[in-house]
Image (spheres, rainbow, N blue to C red):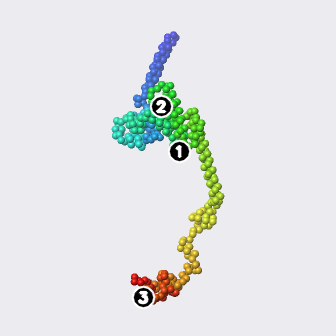
Amino acid sequence: MEKRVEQLETELKKLKVEYNTLMESTAAGLADKTKPGEGKVKRDMSMQALIRPWGGREDEESVDNFLKNIEMVASCGGWTEQDKTLICLLKLTGASATCVAGFPTLLEPTATLEDYRRILKDRFDPIQSSAEKLLQLNSVGQWAGEKVKEFADRCRKLGEETIPNEAMSMLEMEWARKQALQVTLAAFMKGIRGEIGLPLRYHPPNSFKEAVEAATRIESAQSQVTYQSEVRAVQEGRREGERRYPATTTGGLTCFRCQQKGHCARECLRRRPQPSQARNLQRRPNDAKPKFQGNCYVCGQSGHLARNCARRATQVKVCVCQQPNIEQDPKGRGPMGGPPTGPESFKGPNC
């Protein structure tokens, strides 16, 4: 019996040793699989949709942030260096794409992401001193249509850029950040537009956060008042229209041709007659144009004028000097005292 117990204890020790060896080998295998940089991550190019296109405009992110996003997505997607440069090239738009097109070396397969970083930073991220950035912060202003929080984000970004990039201790960095927040607060209060900035100037807040919250409340109240005034104007205009045009606004459209509601005059079935038909319908026998009342100065007959007389074209013209001394009408209508019956007279060059 004792021998049997000793054999079981010996087998149990062997099993413990084998178990420990198996666990160590399993842990080592898992550690090898999770080691970075050995291509163990599955390559996934669909993650490039997480990177936004970049054109180098002022309202977009900086060059460093754009390239950092590419590196972060590349590490998660298992991209190679060629994949990074290809995605960087495809995501460039506008001025940034034009800039890269001017450097043929960037289009070669040997180009790296650092080459893109160097050229894009030289073009879109000029080196500015802290004084220049501080001057830019002091001259910042709210754009037309820009919300208060959007303007605050822009001021905060410029304020962070005013902090020097020098090696400083924790106390110095904290002090520089506090000073930057004070300067950012002053620039925010100065650059905000309209009536929103007046209460902030009358009662200056103690921190940048308080200033943003107060300006946001004023903006919300002002937009609510504007909305109510617009609604009131629409309602008053509707009442004015109902008062001036009751048939049009309350009872529907009224036709001015048949006096029926529900349609306009141009849609009325009772069409107006054609102009020729209207003239024929309106013409009456007694409505004829009255004839000329008077005598013609050429033939002496009534019913027409001298310019329409048939005898005027065939009449022989006689010079005045060859006619007897008769007093003539100064308007050339023949002798005074009655209509002419003879040939038409005129003045010659020797008269």
Q: Position of residue 294 (x, y in %)?
A: 54, 83
**The furthest residue to the bottom:** 324
The Cα atoms of the two marked residues, 2 and 1, are separated by 29 Å
Q: Secondary structure at mark 2?
A: loop
Q: Are marks 1 and 3 in contact (CB under 8 Å)?
A: no
**Foreground pick, 80 / 14:** 80
Q: Nearer the viewer, mark 2 or mark 1?
A: 2
Identify which residue is drawn at 62% across, 63% down. Answer: 254
Q: Secondary structure at mark 3?
A: helix
The Cα atoms of the two marked residues, 2 and 3, are separated by 117 Å
Asked if residue 183 shows in the view, the reply is: yes
Question: In the drawing, does residue 290 fall left or right of residue 307?
Answer: right
Identify which residue is drawn at 41% across, 38% down. Answer: 124
Q: Tag 3: residue type?
A: Gln
Q: Nearer the viewer, mark 2 or mark 3?
A: 3
**Label 1: how many Cα within 10 Å (few below 14, some 14–19, many 20+):** few
Asked if residue 84 shows in the view, the reply is: no
Precedes in sequence: disc 2 or disc 1: 1
The residue under label 2 is: 163
The residue under label 1 is: 145
Residue 260, compared with residue 307, is above or below; it is: above
The residue under label 3 is: 322
**Label 2: how many Cα within 10 Å (few below 14, some 14–19, many 20+):** some
**Label 3: how many Cα within 10 Å (few below 14, some 14–19, many 20+):** few
**Foreground pick, 275 / 72:** 275
Identify which residue is drawn at 54% across, 38% down. Answer: 189
Q: Quadrant of residue 41?
A: top left
Q: Tag 2: residue type?
A: Ile
Residue 25, compared with residue 337, is above or below; it is: above
Q: Tag 1: residue type?
A: Gly
